[in-house]
Amino acid sequence: MVGSRDVDLKAEFEEMMEECDNNNILIVDDTETNIDLLMAALSDDFEVSVDLNGEEALQHLNEHSADLVLLDIMMPGIDGYEVFERMKANPRLSGIPVVFLTALNHIENEAKGLNLGAVDYITKPYNPSLVKARVRNHIELANSRRHLQQQRSQIAEDYEALQDLETLRDNLVHMIVHDMKSPLMGICGNLELAEECLGETLDDTARQMLSNSLKTTRGLNEMISSLLDVSRLEAGEMPLTLSDCDLRMLVSEACERLGRMTIDRQVELRLGDQPLPVQCDRNLIERLVLNLVGNALKYAPADRPVFVKAYPEETWLTVEIHDEGPGIPAEYQDRIFEKFGQVEAHG
């Protein structure tokens, strides 16, 4: 069975083969016999141009460029090495592959040319089949590099466009969430007032409905605060209000705020007997503890306790939340550090 990727690769290969027929080869040689042999070997498959010396070749390349240069080393005027070095110094020409043409008894020329950066060499007298095969191989390699560079450029453009879209989305989300916070706080305040003033006059069903509404509204308010915090953190604008706190009291008060989530549940606080003084942003740490303990209560078995510990170590204070829930599979653990990353619960 042929997969879609195989078809794509075949299409790309056929496209590159078609490009080979349109590639421009520049022959730089001052010997008519050599030129005739190279033209005979290549002209049926490629568009071939000829220059008789190095200065003409450099002018030609600056005006018309080429996909491959067959460059004789020994020529009148500037030799092939100097032509190659000038090409390498010119950003427009430095990427053109060069194959040196050298006499069979000048083996040292081959090493020098390759050390300079030539892709290959062809020795004289020329073997037409060998010339054609080597030229086609290097043209295909050049085309492959060009395709790869085009793909890289396209990926870079797509990535930049994706970043722009993500920024636009984040700005839109931030604007919507920010505008939602004030009316939601108003709803939450009115529900709290209604519960305080009317709670005793309502029957059990209505009182439970009011309590659930208030709980849900508070949850939405926490979500909105988290979204705004993420935006501020990413922008490097997260304000920290530092104050001296007792971590034991902070953790204890955070757990008390869980309210109904702890009814018929075992939340065991192991906070020690001594104060744990720390300077921190009280609201952020409280919300952190709320989220962690709330998550533990959500997924831990109802008949098993959730342990909350706070204790000093050498140079810091540690807070631990332990539960006997299913946990996060190892393959998904990195996702908890992604923005808004979520993992389905596993029983």
Image (cartoon, helix red, strand yellow):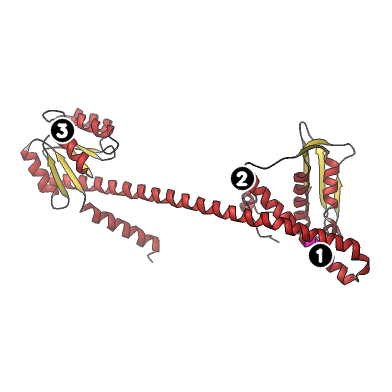
- Whichever of callouts 3 and 2 sits on the residue coming sooner in the sequence is 3
Residue range in magenta is 210-216
- The stretch drawn in magenta includes residue 213: yes
**Label 3, residues with CA under 10 Å away: few <14, some 14-19, many ≥20:** some
Dot 2 amino acid type = Glu
Q: Is residue 3 above or below residue 78?
A: below
Q: Main secondary structure of the magenta part?
A: helix
Q: Which residue is mark 2?
A: 234
- Whichever of callouts 2 and 1 sits on the residue coming sooner in the sequence is 1
- Residue 122 is situated, as x and y percent measured from the top left of the image, at 18, 38
Dot 1 amino acid type = Asn
Residue nearest the viewer, comparing 110 with 320:
320
Residue at position x 13%, y 46% in the image? 128
**Label 1, residues with CA under 10 Å away: few <14, some 14-19, many ≥20:** few
Q: Which residue is mark 1?
A: 212
- The stretch drawn in magenta includes residue 325: no
Would you say 306 lies left or right of 105 here?
A: right
